[in-house]
Amino acid sequence: MTETVAMSDIDIAINDAAGLDTVIQPEMATVVFTPSGLRGEFPVGTSVLQAAQQLGVDLESSCGGRGICGRCQVTPGVGEFSKHRISSRIEHLTPPSELEISNKDRVLEQGRRLGCAAQILGDMVVDVPSDSQIHKQHIVKEATTVEINQDPAIKLFTVTVTEPDMHEPASDFRRLQWAIEEKMQTEQALDLGCDLAVMQQLQPALKAAAREVSVAVYHPTNARSEVIAIWPGVKESLYGMAVDLGSTTVAAHLCDLTTGDIVASASVMNPQIRFGEDLMSRVSYVMMNDGGDKEMTDAVQGALAELAKDAAAKADIAIDDILEMTIVCNPIMHHLLLGIDPTPLGSAPFALATDRSVSLKASELNLNLNPQARAFILPCIAGHIGADTAGVILAERPDLAEEVTLLVDVGTNAEIVLGNRDRLLAASSPTGPAFEGAQISCGQRAASGAIERVRIDPDTLEPRFKVIGCDLWSDDIDFARQTRKIDISGVCGSGIIEVIAELFLAGVINSDGVIDPAMAVKSSRIVAEGRTYAYVLHDGAKTLRITQNDVRAIQLAKAALYAGIRLLMDHLGISSVGRVGLAGAFGSHIDVKYAMVLGLIPDCNLDLVGPVGNAAGTGARIALLDRAKRDEIERVLRTVEKIETAIEAKFQDHFVEAMALPHLTDEFVELGKAVKLPEKKAADPAAATAGRGRRRRRSR
């Protein structure tokens, strides 16, 4: 007789006396991998690499786990992670092996471990850095073409400074000022300042090039000017960076300040993801871990410094030729970047430390640019409406339009702007990371091998799809050959939107969001999964299923977004909008038709709905290249009405109605002209009950 249990030494002795064989269950530990969010339980002693491979985590290892390649590097999380209900400790991994110690300086970066060598001893949160991922994140934040008035805050002048003259006593700096005034063709004397470190460079530069020098003048307003850099002779260009600091990705455009041209672009995953995928998780980390805010400040400042270094290398310029950085970000990222405690933003009344723009030296943010480089951060609007929304408004200027415009920047937290030249409202809505592939069973962030487009035959329910890294559809005869070296590894945000919308249009999912079990008779792709059903999108090396919980996660996210939009429409007293602009990487990549089919956005003529690119980043670029827009956006933002969804009684009502596809009560007449929407039909009561039960557990 054999008994399998987890037992104490006393239990084992009793069993031995009774003649029972004892099979001891191994002690288990819970491991959560970020940024994927994949979670599992593993026997103590399992290597991090083995755990990652069992869960399908995107962790590279080209040597088969022998510790030779050094590519399976991971960063252990340390602290209390309330969202995951995990207390992650450094001692929950085995101490560094001899192999790791010998490779510490040559291969391993600070704070990292080799996944093949580190064994799990207890509950852990483990981050997989982007350079350890097989499928690198596909960050789509390309610069949008826009006409910008060329008047940057930092200008380059090449001047010849007159020789000293005993008959006309004046310092070399005074003579430099005269030359700059002449170059600027200003009749009024400049109030020109200069730091000591720059002043010390003046006379050596004059001597080196026969009194011809190039100077960078920081001129943010007509009343204030400062010489911040001096070079002997002629210097052709200066550079500035416009940065969109998102909670998931960070994107930057390096611009020539003399021409306005973009000379390089760079992007990176936000390293703060390892502290929490969504913003509230990061605030919670700060609350529960002493020094957590400094950890995140160091991480994001380090990311910006690396981004600048990367962009400079791409443009083949010296890093100290970058003289300014303009930044847009959400309020929590804003506070963490500046080293300000973000916890007041975690609960009502969501108080900002400041709602004004911030201008400071880049060195105060530990950015290794030119020693005198400046940083300018656009103003936040309210506790959950940040400088990124200010950037969107600056780029799109709904305040100048006659028609009512809806602007939506979809991310882990969706920012919403609605109005026209008469009135402008703004709000944010907590959509979570589902639109980016997180919280989805087969979801992943946009990377090579991710399914990004889906079509489903309504008669056979057979799918065809496209993956990132291949331009062909999966039913193309050459698809298999061209994707041979691409692992079809998951479904990214745009693919998730399309597959769920296509399943709805094909009748597999009803308007309540329930996968209809009766459709299993029609297709073997509809499979039972516990008390609910799933749709098999791809059956290959890795089976990709769309589960009932996946549908619920998207419903919850889209309902939060739509409810926020409806609140603003209520406040504005309108039932429809004139134009819809979708901002950000996600908004730029999704098919607007499918977004409307699911009910992410209200009904509108599809011809008047479209992507507006990385509008937040465009706003940062406008602020970089046209100094007058900095004061202008501050004036506009003072007129914006802030709507706080958390305290609006109607939000919950709108949210419940928006759970339906596309909506419980709102009519989608314009959409119906372009798409044949299915008739509402009742689902199997048991399946519906199961779906609702799972939704309640997920939403806690």
Image: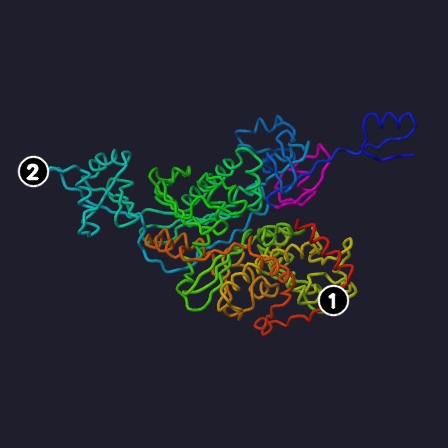
Q: What crowding class fits label 1: few (fewer than 14 Cα within 10 Å), some (14-19), or many (20 or more)?
A: few
Q: Position of residue 582 (x, y in %)?
A: 51, 60
Q: Position of residue 514 (x, y in %)?
A: 71, 61
Please tell me whether residue 113 is drawn above or below residue 474 in the rendered image.
Answer: above
User: Is residue 328 visible to us here?
Assistant: yes
Look at the numbered disc 2 and give the secondary structure of its residue: loop
Q: Nearer the viewer, mark 2 or mark 1?
A: 1
Which residue type carries mark 2?
A: His
Q: Which corner quadrant holds the N terminus?
A: top right
Q: Which mark is residue 682?
A: 1
Query: To which quarter of the image does residue 131 belong?
Result: top right
Q: Position of residue 624 (x, y in %)?
A: 36, 51
User: Is residue 466 visible to us here?
Assistant: no
Q: Which mark is residue 167?
A: 2
Q: Position of residue 254 (x, y in %)?
A: 40, 49
Q: Which mark is residue 366?
A: none
In the image, 71: left or right of 377?
right
The mark total stands at 2
Query: To which quarter of the image does residue 58 belong?
Result: top right
In the image, 3: left or right of 281?
right
**From which residue to which does the magenta span run?**
36-64
Which residue type carries mark 1?
A: Ala
Please tell me whether residue 133 is drawn above or below residue 568 in the rendered image.
Answer: above
Given residues 542 and 119, the one toward you in this image is 119
Q: CA distance from mark 2 to mark 1?
A: 97 Å
Given residues 37 and 100, the one toward you in this image is 37
Q: Which residue of the protein is positioned furthest toward the bottom in this rendering? A: 673
Please tell me whether residue 26 is drawn above or below residue 646 in the rendered image.
Answer: above
Look at the numbered disc 1 and give the secondary structure of its residue: loop
Colouring of the image: rainbow
